[in-house]
């Protein structure tokens, strides 16, 4: 079997909260559920630990898509963290859309520790969306003059 | 107008109510009044209040309200929102300030007067609804309405939300103008590619002079993330590509929920980038998602981004609304 290594693969950064989504990813792994290796998981103590600048930084460092996973609203280990994260991400994503950055490059999904299937399905779906968009160039180019 | 304010300031200085006066004085030209602190009655003769006093004095009060004795400050209606916001964030010592609320008929934009074909302008006099423009090539007139700053066309109204006394020419009842979010809506209606092209055209002109940050009353951090101790070049160089690419998003984000929409960022931008549109987009989103909110309207309410309800919209709303 030959493999084509020259094919472009999207780089995905997934911020996963320690208590739900990271455990969900673990369950997906131990249940042998497949999701592409292009997803790089960054474990955070809570979804609200994700400063909006982390998302921008991930894009600047070459990510093509960024996904944030946390506990379902109401289930946060710290009671209310994900509610704050929800407001922040809603406004940040809306701003990125306003600047003309493709809105399918960002996503928030609530994944509990028992939802290994959901984790794998979410990642597969998200990576497909980003693959369709191609490499992320707009955020890099936004301050460059057009020829 | 100006004479009344000078007389009042002199009286307050003389009876010891205030130790200094924060106002505007004539700049290099007749049409770029600049913020200034006056400490003596004589120096107050330089005090200016005219259509070019667009500068928001609230931010200067952070420093001045920490000095000994009270500081008298003149605030236009929209400036009082910034002032209130700074009280809320414990940046200003209200006990050390004396506020005289001044009226405003919309501030003037010298670039618009120049764009109307006036070259070598020497002075601009306001006479009611007309401007008498004195230039090296003769005199000209134009309607005042045509020369007001864009931000004043969507004025928040004449109400002062915080003050100690009102000047005689104040119109507290002046209604707010319609259509504050029209420009934002126009952009939202475009295709993403068109929006991107628009912003690329605007933001690529940025020279990173940091004027927008320095003037912003909401940008009041003692240490800004854009300041870098490793370089001495007045923090104006691009120290990393991250800053280079994301400066405007971060700047707008950092004041989201606290921005009172005073429009100073766009007024001071030497490249005329409509930076206020980024702030206004956040305000319009916050209004839409979390209920109407005007930063600085009071000193007690919680800012929308440090608050939540259990049934807030999900971030996927951004995709759903098309």
Image (tube, coloured by chain):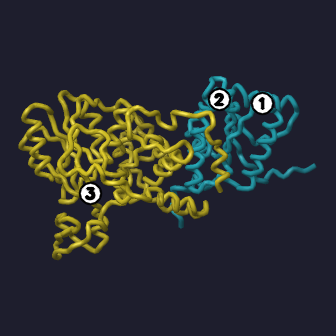
Chain colours: A cyan, B yellow
The quadrant where residue B13 appears: top left
- The residue shown at (18%, 59%) is B29
Query: Viewed as shown, does residue B194 lie left or right of A115?
Result: left
Observer able to see residue B321 = yes
Residue A78 location, x and y as percent?
Answer: 63, 23
Q: Secondary structure at mark 1?
A: helix
- The residue shown at (34%, 57%) is B152
Identify the chain of the residue marked 1, using the numbered disc in the image.
Answer: A
The foreground one among B154 and B91 is B154
- The residue shown at (57%, 62%) is B189
- The residue shown at (68%, 30%) is A17
Identify the chain of the residue marked 3, using the numbered disc in the image.
Answer: B
The foreground one among B238 and B94 is B94
For label 1, the residue is: A24
Q: Which is in the foreground here, disc 2 or disc 3?
A: 3
Observer able to see residue B236 = no
Query: Viewed as shown, does residue A111 lie left or right of B175?
Result: right
For label 2, the residue is: A44
Q: Secondary structure at mark 3?
A: loop
Check the image and report above or below for B276 versus B310. Answer: below
Residue B173 location, x and y as percent?
Answer: 30, 51
Count how many numbered circles sit on residues in the image: 3
Pointer 1 and pointer 3 on the same chain: no
Q: Which is in the foreground here, disc 1 or disc 3?
A: 3
For label 3, the residue is: B105
Of the image marks 2 and 1, the number of the one nearer the N terminus: 1
Mark 3 residue crowding within 10 angstroms, few (<14) / some (14–19) / many (20+): some
């Amino acid at each position: 079997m030959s493999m084509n290594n020259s094919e472009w693969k999207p780089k995905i950064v997934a911020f996963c909260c320690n208590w739900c989504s990271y455990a969900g990813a673990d369950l997906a792994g131990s249940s042998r559920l497949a999701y592409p290796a292009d997803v790089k998981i960054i474990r955070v103590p809570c979804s609200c630990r994700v400063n909006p600048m982390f998302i921008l930084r991930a894009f600047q460092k070459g990510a093509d898509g960024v996904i944030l996973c946390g506990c379902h609203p109401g289930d946060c280990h710290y009671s209310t963290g994900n509610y704050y994260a929800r407001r922040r991400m809603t406004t940040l994503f809306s701003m990125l859309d306003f600047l003309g950055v493709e809105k399918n490059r960002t996503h928030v999904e609530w994944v509990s520790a028992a939802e290994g299937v959901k984790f794998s399905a979410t990642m597969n779906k998200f990576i497909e969306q980003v693959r369709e968009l191609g490499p992320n160039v707009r955020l890099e180019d936004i301050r460059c003059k057009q020829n | 107008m100006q004479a009344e304010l000078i007389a009042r300031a002199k009286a307050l200085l003389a009876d010891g109510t205030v130790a200094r006066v924060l106002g505007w004085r004539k700049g290099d030209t007749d049409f770029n009044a600049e913020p200034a602190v006056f400490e003596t009655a004589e120096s107050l003769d330089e005090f200016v209040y005219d259509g070019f006093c667009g500068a928001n004095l609230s931010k200067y009060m952070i420093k001045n309200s920490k000095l000994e004795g009270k500081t008298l400050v003149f605030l236009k209606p929209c400036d009082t929102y910034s002032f209130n916001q700074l009280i809320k964030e414990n940046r200003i010592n209200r006990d050390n300030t004396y506020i005289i609320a001044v009226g405003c008929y919309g501030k003037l934009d010298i670039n618009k007067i120049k764009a109307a074909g006036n070259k070598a302008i020497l002075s601009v006099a306001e006479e009611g609804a007309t401007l008498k423009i004195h230039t090296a090539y003769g005199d000209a007139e134009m309607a005042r309405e045509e020369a007001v700053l864009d931000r004043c066309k969507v004025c928040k109204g004449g109400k002062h939300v915080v003050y100690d006394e009102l000047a005689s020419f104040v119109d507290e009842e002046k209604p707010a103008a319609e259509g504050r979010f029209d420009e934002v809506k126009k952009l939202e209606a475009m295709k993403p590619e068109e929006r991107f092209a628009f912003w690329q055209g605007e933001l690529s002109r940025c020279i990173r002079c940091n004027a927008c940050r320095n003037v912003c009353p909401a940008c009041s951090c003692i240490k800004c993330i854009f300041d870098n101790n490793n370089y001495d070049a007045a923090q104006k160089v691009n120290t990393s590509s991250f800053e280079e690419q994301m400066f405007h998003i971060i700047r707008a984000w950092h004041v989201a929920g606290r921005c009172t929409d005073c429009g100073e960022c766009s007024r001071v931008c030497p490249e005329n980038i409509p930076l206020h549109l980024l702030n206004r987009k956040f305000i319009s989103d916050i209004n839409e998602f979390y209920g109407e909110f005007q930063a600085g309207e009071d000193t007690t309410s919680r800012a929308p981004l440090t608050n939540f309800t259990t049934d807030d919209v999900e971030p996927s709303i951004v995709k759903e609304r098309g």
